Amino acid sequence: MTSRLLVIDQGTTSTRAIVFDGALAPLATAQREFPQIYPQPGWVEHDPEQLWNTSLGTAIEVLARAGLTATDITAIGITNQRETTLVWDRQTGQAIHNAIVWQDRRTAERCEALAAAGHAAMVTERSGLRLDPYFSATKIGWILDQVPGARRRAEAGELAFGTVDSFLLWRFTAGRVHAIDATNASRTLLCNITTGEWDDELLRLLDIPRALLPEIRDSASEFGATSLLGGGEIAIRGIAGDQQAALIGQGCFAPGTVKATYGTGGFVLLNTGARAVPSRHRLLTTIAWQRRGQRTYALEGSIFSAGTAVQWLRDGIGLVGSAPETGELAAAADPRQPVFLVPAFTGLGAPHWDSRARATISGITRGTTRREFARAALESVGFQTRDLLGAMFDDVADTTPRAEHAVRVDGGMAASDWTMQFLADMLDAAVDRPAYLETTALGAAYLAGLQSGLFPEPDQMTPPTPIERRFTPSLEPAERAARYRGWRRAVRQALYEPPDEM
């Protein structure tokens, strides 16, 4: 029988399902958007039932589009928005609160208090992460403290926590499996980055009952099976958080390889092999994947707002009618008017980690038009990526030789030729764009196929998708340096400064 793999890619603004053949070529796609919920500034939520309904609905739809049934599918892979936090009732499967999204900043004061009490270094040493509201643990604590009776019920074992992968796995298996893969576990602030297990000291510090937590499993593993897609059971055999899945889908299997994904946010990962490299520049140490109990690690830098900046131009202030229009406007912008947009709409991620930073626009003159605004939004991606990679390569200079002098890109913004050329110019490095941009789903398909015996192990696997175009730098060094200095000045203006005492 010809092998077919079904992937559910549950993202921040939409859910996509894709069927791949045994050579990892896409056969059919279905996608559904869902609304974002903003209860107050800095808070972002999702309706858990929307996450579930779009996941189940797109899976059923894509099988119909491909003319397939459950018996035609070898295995399912799941990839998901990371850090987004759900707590649900083990008996009913119903969430006790909306999902708190990775972008949410409501626990900033809690994180600051823990840091002020001297816990930051221990948290980073054990988890590889930073005390920041970005991660799951303080979101869990907030739900337990705000929903009446939740903490008591959690301690009694009546409630379950999960990132989105765990929640979907629970639903697809009708509550039979409460598990999380190692990549998602490493984003909770509760997992020991060295042992790959839940850490008792972190659980005590963050006051999270162990009874809430799922079992940590390999990224390619037997996660159970679902009979909800009609025509029989399908095994679920691959799970990874979206950015680790994109690293896999880009074929970054060798230490020193780098990928950058540009969607709602931007995420740069560098494979560091079997070594968990601590960062001197406030980057994150994370699990890239786990196979047969052996972990491969990565350094990661997170940009909170990438595509969000373009969405703001379109939906927030109405300067553009569509996202693709920004590239045309940027190309027509006046080069004598350097305008800088620092898109700190929900704070700044690595290497700044300032949850109170707010977006700024600088360099505006009377002659500034929407063309310069569009260029500034797209350029912010290149500038933020340079911030990350400069710190990243310095961190690994003594431990991880660079495997190649190119950055592999994917995600929606990678389709913009203008943006990718500016990225190459600002990095002074080649930027490789693959023929198939949905590398997140591709990575999950590979994991499911790996567990099914369809593909070789990572150290023997070639990149799953060929390069469609390579962008090479063309900017003069003096101009590159001048533009970057302007960006650094703009970032300083966006960083939070406590108000002067009266």
Image (cartoon, grey):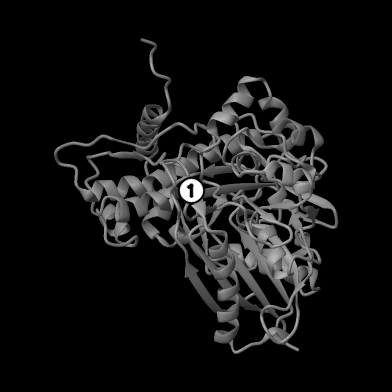
Q: Quadrant of the N terminus?
A: bottom right
**Residue 499 shown left or right of residue 162 in the figure:** left
Q: Residue at x 62, y 50 (%)?
A: 85
Q: Residue at x 68, y 62 (%)?
A: 93
Which is nearer the eye, 175 or 429? Answer: 175
Amino acid at dot 1: Val
Residue 240 locus on image (x, y percent): 68, 58
Residue 279 locus on image (x, y percent): 66, 33
**Residue 302 shown left or right of residue 180 in the figure:** left
Secondary structure type for disc 1: loop
Q: Total number of numbered labels?
A: 1
Which is nearer the eye, 36 or 253? Answer: 36
Does 1 appear above or below 62? below
Q: Quadrant of the C terminus?
A: top left
Residue 484: name its quadrant: top left
Residue 462 appearing in the image: no
Circle 1 packing at 10 Å, graded few (<14), some (14-19), many (20+), is many
Which is nearer the eye, 102 or 418? Answer: 102
Does 396 appear above or below 19? above
Residue 498: name its quadrant: top left
Does 125 appear above or below 58? above
Q: Residue at x 70, y 81 (%)?
A: 73
Q: Which residue is mark 1?
A: 44
**Residue 493 shown left or right of residue 448 in the figure:** left
Residue 88: name its quadrant: bottom right
**Residue 44 shown left or right of residue 466 in the figure:** left
Residue at the right extreme, as displayed? 292
